[in-house]
Amino acid sequence: MKLLFEKGSPGRTGTTLPALDVQRSDRVPDSVRRREDAALPELSELDVIRHFVNLSRKNMGIETSFYPLGSCTMKYNPRFHEDVASFTGFAGLHPRLSLLPEGEEYCQGALRAVFEAERFLAELLGFADFTMQPLAGAHGEMTGLMLIAAFHEAKGEDRSVMLIPDSAHGTNPASATLAGFSARVIGTDAFGNVDLASLEKALGPDVAGLMLTCPNTLGLYDANVRQINEMVHASGGLVYADGANLNAIVGRVRPGDLGFDIMHINLHKTFSTPHGGGGPGSGPVGVCAKLVPFLPVPHIQEHSNGSLRLKHESAYSVGPVAPYYGNFLVILRAWAYMTTLGIEGFRRVSENAVINANYLRVRLQQAYKPAFERACLHECVLSASAQARLGVRALDIAKALLDRGFHAPTIYFPLIVEEALMIEPTETESKETLDAFISAMLEIAALAESAPDAVTAAPLTMPVRRLDETTAARRPDVAALDLEETP
Amino acid sequence: MPYIANTAQDRKEMLQAIGVESFDELWHLADVHESPPRFNLPEKGLSELEVLAKLGTLARENRTDLICFTGGGVYDHFVPAAISHVVERGEFLTSYTPYQPEASQGTLQAVYEYQSAMCRLTGMEVSNASLYDGGTALFEAILMALRRNRRRKVLIAGTLSPIYQAMVRTSSHHLAAEVRVTSDEPDQCADELLKSLDEETSSVVIQYPDFYGTIRDWTPLVMKAREKGITPICSVYPLALALLKTPGEMGFEIVTGEGQSLGIPLSFGGPYLGFMTTTSDFMRKMPGRICGRTKDLSGKPGFVLTLQAREQHIRREKATSNICTNESLCALRAIIYLALMGKTGFRRVGELCASKASFAAETLISIPGVRLASSDGFFNEFVIELPVDAKPVVSQLLRKGFMAGIPLGAFREERNKQVLLAVTEKRTREEIVGLAEALGGAL
C-alpha cells in the first residue's frame, strides 16, 4: 500500500475548522517563524479514513484471531470500556484542574476512580498502598526499583546489587541498570524454580533485593517462594514481584501475603485493557507498609469528610514518575473490569487461564517437548528442539501458524529454553478455539517431518512474505523524509 | 461468568484430558499450596448496565464545562471525531507489539508514517515509535546524551516545565550525573545557559516555547553547545511547530515532547504520547521501538521493527533503555490527526491559536492594572501579571466557570501575581471577552 505521503493532491484537507472570529495577528517573532509549512499529507477525510481502515485490515488482533502470545495475556478487552473512556466527564477533563486552587473539588469523580482502583488493587494483592502513576510495566519496574533504592538510602545502607533470575524478562535487568543497580544473575534448578544454592551464594550485604516473576516466565509456580523471600529479607534485601504473570494466581494468592515487599502489575494484561499495538499500558506499583512513605507524589488521600485531596509533598517520596495520575483512561477501564468481575470473577479468571494452559500443554506434548515435565499455571513453555533437528525452527512454526489463522506464541523466550514456544491462551478462549489451535500445531509438527520446506516457506497468506530484517537493520530506512526540508 | 466461554462441561472434559479430577487437584499439582485468602472486597461483580451507571455518576462529578484557558503542557485542542472511530478498529486496538511483522503490517506502516511525520514536523531525520509522555521522553534524551559523550553534567533551562524538572530529578537521582537548573527568568536563563557551557557538560535542555510561553531563536546557543561537544536537547510543543521554526533548523540534536496536542483528548493526564526525534548519528543510541521499511522475499515493500540490538529483550542490562510497551495507539492518533489536518489544516490550527492568543493578551491587558509579564514573543501561551495575588482570583474565576490559567506563585513566591494562560482554536471571541469581563470584575 502507498504511503500517506505518496497520496493526495495540493490544497486538500481532511477537516473543517471555524472561521477566525478575531483579527488575524500573532506574536511570533520573525526570527523563529517557520518558512514553509510542514510537509504533511494533503488528503480528504474519506481518503484518510480509507487509508487507515485498509491498514488495519493487515493486522491480526485479539478480535480477529486467537493470540496466544506468552507473557502478554492477550485476553478479550470488553467493548463497553471504550465507551466509558470516551465519556466527556473523563476524556474532556484537564489534569491541571486538580492542581488549581480549590480545583480538586471540580474533579472528585476522576480522583475517586483512581483512588478506588488503588484501594481495590491493594486489597486484592495484599499490599498497604499503590501508586497508579507508572505508565507501563517497565516503568513500574523502574519505579519499584527506585523505591527500593530510596529505602536503603534512608537507612544509610549502600546496597548496589539487584538479583535477577536467568529466566527473567529483559526489562528486569534493563530497569535495574537504569535505577543505578548492577544486575547479578541467579540460576534455575532442574524443576524450573529458583536455584536456592545459587541464591544463597549470591546474597550478601551488597544486595539491595531480588526481582522475582511470580509465577515465573516458564509459567511455573515456585513452591519455595516464601522461603526465597525470607532468605532475601534475612540478608537485609527487599523482594520485588514482577506481576507480568499475575493472571495465573489473581483472586487465589495474594503476593503481599507471600512476603513480597513491592510489586508492579500490568493493567493491560491482567486487567484487560487493550494493548493498542504496543501501548498505552499502565504499570501500577504496590508496596508493603514500610515502603509507603517513599511512594511517588502527588498521591490521592481521602479526608474524614469523604472528599479526596492530593498530597504533593512527602519527606521521603521519590518524587513524581509521571506528570499526573498515570494513564487515567487505562485505569478507568481497569476499574470497570474489577467492578464487573468481583472476587468471584477473578477466581474464575485464574481457574480458566490455568485449565486452558494445561489443556494445551497436555495435548501438545505428544509433538512438542515441554520445557519442564510438570503442571504449569497460565502459560505453557514448549520446545521445538525436536523440530529444529529436522530444519524447522520455532520461528518457522510461528509463521506457519499465521497462515492457519492464529497469531504466533512468544518465541525464543525464556532464553534458557532451546527453541522456546511460550503459549498463553488466557481464560477468555473457548475449548473449540484451543482444539483448532492444537490441530494446527499438530499438523505443523507432522509437516515438519514429512515436508519441512512447506513449513519454512510460511507465511504465504499474509499481506507480505518473510521480510528482510538484516538489510532493514544494516541500511535503516526509518522515515520518508521530505527531501527539500531535510537539514 | 463475565467474558469466560468455557462451561462446566467444557472444563470437565479438559480436566479429564489433563488427567485430573478437579481444578483443585491441578492447582496442587502445579505446586501451589497457599490457603485461599479472604478479601475485604465485593464477592460478586456487577453487570455492564450497573457499571456504566456507576461510572456515569463519577463522570458527572467532574467539571468539563469550564471554559479552558489552561495549558502548561496539556492543551484543550480540537480532536476530529474520525480519529477515535479509526483507532477503535479491533485490528489496531487489540493487537500488540508487532513481533510478527507479517501479521502486523497495518500497525507497522502506521508507525513508519508517524515516524516520517514527526521528522518532518521537527526537522529531524529519525524518530522512534513513541515513548510514554513528554517528561519521560526528555529523561530518555538526557540518558542518550550521557551515553554518547560520557560526560557528567546536565544543564537544564529553568524555563522547563516544573513537572518535567521534578520528573528528571526523580529519575536521575541514582545516576552519576550532576543536574544543574538555571533561573526561570527567560533572559537570565539564556545568559546562564550560555555561560555554563563547558567541556564537562553532557547536554543542555531547552523547552520551546518555554513553560511561560516565551519563544526565542536558540540557534546561537545550540551552535556554541555543539562546538563544545554538548548535545542540545529541545522539548517542544508540537502544535506550535505549525508556525514556528523547527528545532532541527536551529541545530538541536535531540527533540522530545508531549504529543497530546496532536489529536489526543485531555484525559485527566493520560494516556498521552512521548515522542523523540533525532539525527542519524544518534539513531543507534535511541531508546524504544523503531520501525523500518524493507522488502519481503518476493521483493514487495514491507515494514519491520528494526535496530533491535539496542533493546532490552536482546541486550538486557546493556540495553539503551528498559522501555518495552510504549504508547502505540496514541501515536496512531497523532498520525491520523496530522493526516486529517494536512499541510494547510495544520497551519490553520496554528494561526487560529496564535491569533486568538494575541487577541486575548490585548483584551486582558486593557483591564486596568493587568499587564504582560514579558515583552517576548509567544505562540498561544503567555503570562499576565495582576495587581493582586493571583491565587484567589483564579479560584474566584473557577467558580464563575473559567479555568483562567495557572497561578505561578506555587512555583516561585515572587511570581505570585502572575497567571499563565493558553488559548487554543476552540476558544471563541465571546469566551475571551467573557474571561476579560470576569477578570475585571474579580480585581
Image (cartoon, grey):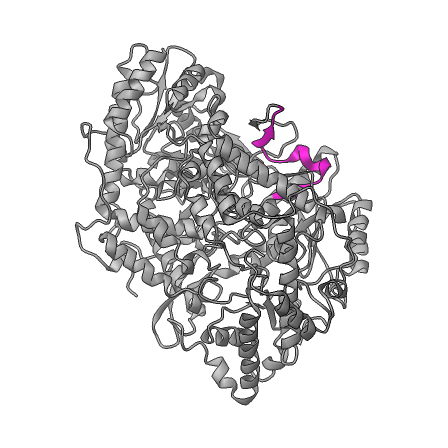
Q: Is residue B186 placed above or below A51 in the rendered structure?
A: above
The one nearer the camera, B208 or A325, is A325
Answer yes or no: is residue A360 visible: yes
Relative image position of residue B75 (x, y in whole percent): 37, 35
In the rendered image of this protein, does residue B179 appear above or below residue A430? above
Residue B224: x and y, percent? 39, 37
- Residue at point 53%, 44% (across, down): A331
Q: Nearer the viewer, residue B366 or B141?
A: B366
Which residue is pictured at 48% across the width and 59% down the height?
Answer: B97
Locate the N terminus of chain A by quadrant: bottom left
Seen at 55% across and 84% down, the residue is A448
- Kindly tell me whether residue B250 is visible in this rendering: no
Q: Quadrant of residue A388?
A: bottom right
Instruction: Identify whether B203 is placed above or below A437.
Output: above
Image quadrant of residue B102? Answer: bottom left
Up/down of B425 relative to A421, above or below = above
B319 with respect to B439 (left or right): right
Within the image, what quadrant is residue B363 found in? top left
Q: Nearer the viewer, residue B425 or B212?
A: B425
Q: Residue at x 40, y 32 (%)?
A: B64
**In the drawing, does residue B8 fall left or right of residue B428?**
right
Q: Which residues are magenta?
A: A285-304
Q: Residue B323, how many percent across, how many down?
A: 53, 51
Q: Looking at the picture, tell me which residue is in the foreground, A251 or B240.
A: A251
Is residue A301 within the magenta segment?
Answer: yes
Give the image location of residue A316, x and y in percent: 66, 30
Question: Is A204 part of what is drawn in magenta?
Answer: no
